[in-house]
């Protein structure tokens, strides 16, 4: 599902998917895998999906990715992927905000 979303669809669905990941993380679940890949931020095709996000939404995602590993027990691969995504892409949205 996530792979086929345009920027408006991504903007609409990502808040609910982030909450679902927080409440029901399962490293083998396609919903968890898809959400983590969608937030990766290292692929130009994924970054295009972020084009309709407002600055506050980008900051919210960055904060979420920053603290998520402290809130749930992520699998090693997922933890590494999200930490890299935060460091290489999302962290820049927190520079002026914090």
Image (tube, rainbow, N blue to C red):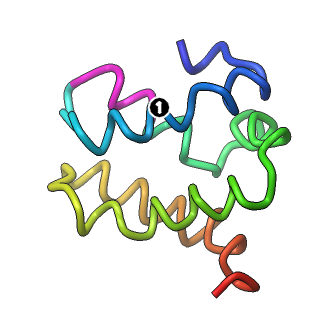
When asked about the image quadrant of residue 19, the answer is: top left
- In percent of width and height, residue 50 lies at 75, 42
Q: Residues within 10 Å of mark 1 (few under 14, many from 20)?
A: few
Q: Main secondary structure of the magenta part?
A: helix
Residue shown at the point (66%, 77%) measured from the top left = 94
When asked about the image quadrant of residue 96, the answer is: bottom right
In the image, residue 30 lies in the stretch drawn in magenta: yes
The residue under label 1 is: 16
Secondary structure beneath dot 1 equals helix
Lateral position of residue 12 relative to residue 17, left or right: right
Lateral position of residue 40 relative to residue 66, left or right: right
Q: Is residue 65 above or below residue 97?
A: above
Residue shown at the point (80%, 51%) measured from the top left = 54
Q: Quadrant of the C terminus?
A: bottom right
- In percent of width and height, residue 83 lies at 42, 65
Q: Is residue 30 above or below residue 78?
A: above
Q: Which residues are magenta?
A: 29-35
């Amino acid at each position: 599902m996530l792979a086929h979303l345009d920027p408006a669809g991504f903007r609409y669905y990502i808040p609910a998917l982030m909450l679902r990941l927080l409440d029901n993380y399962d490293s083998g679940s396609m919903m968890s895998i898809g959400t983590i890949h969608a937030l990766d931020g290292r692929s130009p095709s994924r970054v295009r999906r972020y084009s309709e996000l407002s600055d506050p939404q980008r900051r919210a995602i960055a904060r979420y990715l920053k603290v998520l590993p402290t809130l749930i027990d992520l699998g090693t691969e997922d933890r590494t992927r999200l930490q890299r995504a935060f460091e290489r892409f999302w962290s820049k949205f927190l520079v002026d905000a914090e």
